[in-house]
Structures are given as structure tokens and as C-alpha cells.
Amino acid sequence: MGLFKGIKNLLFEEVDEHGRPIKREEKKTAPAAEPANSASAQGMPADDANSQSTSMGIDFKSDDNSEPAEIDEGVLDNIIAMLDEKNLPGPDYLELKKAANDEVLLQSIPDEKMRFTVSYATLKAASPSLSKKQILQSILTYIQYIEDERGRGIEQFNKLWQEQVVAREEAVEKAKAEIAELEAKLEKLKTFAQEQEGQVVAVKADCGKKKKEFNATVDYMIGKLRMDGAKLEEALKE
């Protein structure tokens, strides 16, 4: 098991039997005064210190200022695997964190700050060149690794958003435009059909009248000719 994989549980105050963080209801407490050995006093920029807290599982908030976002176990495991591959050589924050959370030390020294002090002294005895600056710098390095992963992840999310959201929204708008165009064409056809239906009624009536008049005229002429034929039959002698 890699060093980061082994320290996964140590990044959270409480975990279950599967190594997953136990979610507890947050207790509202008054903000504590900043200690003298704060991040800025130790040479860590304030922004980096804030980034550290969010990257260490302290304040996983969503981007929309709504409810805190749930921790994605798959993403967490991937980040841990990535950090395990990029574990810096020699003792640093990770080894110090693991040493400070040794089960024997936890039982004998409940205070975390004291455990850090004891563990740091032990590591420094084995590696005299180790310094507080190296420990803090290693934290910033690991944070940068995670931020780099965040950047790649955001690029993937943006690509997915473009393909699955923006492209579909554009398709929807195009479909709506086509529907509006078809509806306008349909209304135009309805108006045309109604106008033609009215004209058909008038034309049918006119055609019927003219047909009757035509037949009546033809019948009249044929009748006249037949009458004249009968008269001539009787009047003409040979």
C-alpha cells in the first residue's frame, strides 16, 4: 500500500471501518484567535494556507455557496493515488502526519500538537537536514499537485458541459426556431385554406348557375330549331 493510500484515514478526524469519512453535524463555534505560529508567520502565504485547508478535507464547499458538497470517494481515491505516485523523496509532511497518528502515540499523547512536536523530533533525529520549512514547503507542493489535477478536471468538466449542455441547448433553440417557422407556415396554410374554401363556395354557386343557364340556352335554341323544322315541314310543298 502506498504511503498516501495508507494515510487516507489520517486526513479526516473520524472514519468508518471502510476508511470513509464520517459526516458529523457541524457545530457553530466562535472563531478562535489566530495563533502566533500561523501559516503567514511560518512563511506560508495566506492564499496557500486557505488552499491547504480546502485540500485537506476541512472545508469541502460547493461553488454556488449553497450546501457543502459531498466528498466523491472516487475522486478522492484518484487524488490519493496521484499523490502516492508523486510522493516527494525523504521525510516531509506526509511522514510527519503518519508518525503523529501512530496508534501507540495516539494513546500515549492525545494532544495533536504535542504529537507533531514529538514526531518531528524523531524524524529530525533520523534525518538531521529536515526542517520546518521543508515540511511546510512539501504541503504547498502537494497542494500544487492537487490544484494541477483540479485544472485538468475543470477542463474535462468544461468540455463535458460544452458537449452535453451547451450543444444540447443550441439544438433545443434550433428546434424551437424550426417549430416557430413551421407554426408560422401552418398558420399561413390555414389562412390560405380558409380563404380558398370561401372562394370555392362562391365559384361553385356561380358555376352551377352558369351551367344551368348554358343548358337552358342550348335547350331553347334546339327547341326553336325543332319548332321551325316542324313549321317548314308543313309549309313547304314540292
Image (cartoon, grey):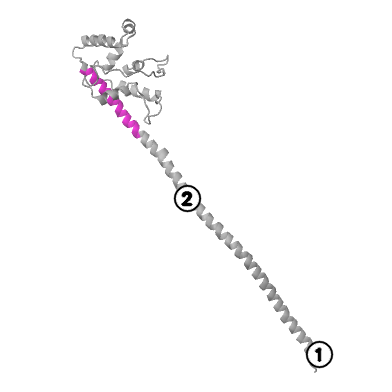
Q: Quadrant of the C terminus?
A: bottom right
Q: Nearer the viewer, residue 160 or 87?
A: 160
* Farthest-out residue, left: 129
Residue 24 is left or right of residue 219, and the answer is: left
How far across and down, in percent of the image, does residue 21 sit?
A: 40, 18
| Secondary-structure class at tag 1 | helix
| Secondary-structure class at tag 2 | helix
Q: In percent of the image, x 26 and y 17: which residue is there?
A: 93
Q: Main secondary structure of the magenta part?
A: helix
Q: Nearer the viewer, residue 116 or 128?
A: 116
- Amino acid type shown at disc 1: Glu
How far across and down, in percent of the image, does residue 181 sit?
A: 48, 52
**Alpha-carbon distance for marks 2 and 1?**
81 Å
| Number of residues whose C-alpha sits closer than 10 Å to that of mark 1, classed few (under 14), some (14–19) or many (20 or more) | few
Residue 201 is left or right of residue 3, and the answer is: right
Q: Is residue 236 magenta?
A: no
Q: Which residue is mark 2?
A: 178
Q: Is residue 135 magenta?
A: yes
Give, as a single range, the part of the protein colored magenta: 133-155
* Nearest to viewer (mark 2 / mark 1): 2
Q: In percent of the image, x 76 and y 83: which residue is there?
A: 226
Q: In percent of the image, x 73 and y 78: which residue is there?
A: 219
Q: Image quarter for residue 152? A: top left
Residue 38 is left or right of residue 72, and the answer is: left
Residue 234 is left or right of residue 70, and the answer is: right
Q: Which residue is mark 1?
A: 234
Is 95 located above or below residue 147 in the figure? above
